[in-house]
Image (spheres, rainbow, N blue to C red):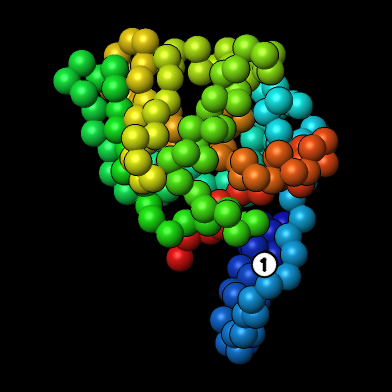
Amino acid sequence: MKTSIRSRRVARIFLVTAFGIALSAAPASAQKPGGTITVGLELDIPGFDPLKVGVYDTAALTASSALFDTLTYLDDNGKPQPKLALSWEPSEDFKMWTFKLRPDVKFHDGTPFNAEAYKANFDRQKDPANKCRCAFYIAAVNNVQAPDELTLVYNLNDPAVNFPSLVSYASQNYAVHSPTAWKTRGDDYNRNPVAPAPMS
């Protein structure tokens, strides 16, 4: 009985090893660019326009993270690194953060991504007339200013030493949309968002 069990184990090990060798010996197939990918989500995506959906649920956030670049991203150690912003600097009291934006970035509709476009996104969400639930999540921000094309200034109500980490998430507040697209597409924009084009 013990010999039979041992023989089966040896046979299994042999088969697994032989299969592994056969796979490694097979020629690697050339990868081709393009194609599609299907991702399973637990919910239907309600859309991407903050004024329509209010707050991104997990499904919208997953998709948004694949579509939108943010000012920063977190590396493997959880530290913010440059993305749409090349650099950032806090004020002495950490209530003001100045971001220097990457030049020559455009949205997918060809319009420029710049400080004014970013500010327009913030102001649209913060505007009480729009009654967006998303405004609650940026209540700690007093205002955003665009002193020049590539300079973005966040003025906070309270100090935030970790603010560059907060703007790394493609949430409803930090996914930057093309102002031209949301103005011209109207209700259709919610299901057809326009993000900054991927950077090389």
Which residue: 45% across, 46% down?
Answer: 114
Which residue: 39% across, 28% down?
Answer: 145
**Compared with residue 26, is residue 37 higher up or lower down, i.e. above or below?**
above
Q: Is residue 30 left or right of residue 87?
A: right
Q: Residues within 10 Å of mark 1 (few under 14, many from 20)?
A: few
The residue closer to the viewer here, 107 or 161, is: 107
Q: Amino acid at mark 1?
A: Arg
**Compared with residue 162, is residue 188 higher up or lower down, i.e. above or below?**
below
Q: Quadrant of residue 38?
A: bottom right
The residue closer to the viewer here, 53 or 124, is: 124
The residue closer to the viewer here, 32 or 22, is: 32
x and y percent of residue 69 in the render?
52, 47
**Compared with residue 95, is residue 200 higher up or lower down, i.e. above or below?**
below
x and y percent of residue 164 in the render?
35, 32
Q: Identify the residue under disc 1.
A: 12
Q: Is residue 134 left or right of residue 147?
A: right
x and y percent of residue 105 in the render?
47, 56
Label 1: state its secondary structure: helix
Whether residue 75 is visible to the viewer of this picture, yes or no, is: no
Q: Quadrant of residue 4?
A: bottom right
x and y percent of residue 122 in the render?
53, 27
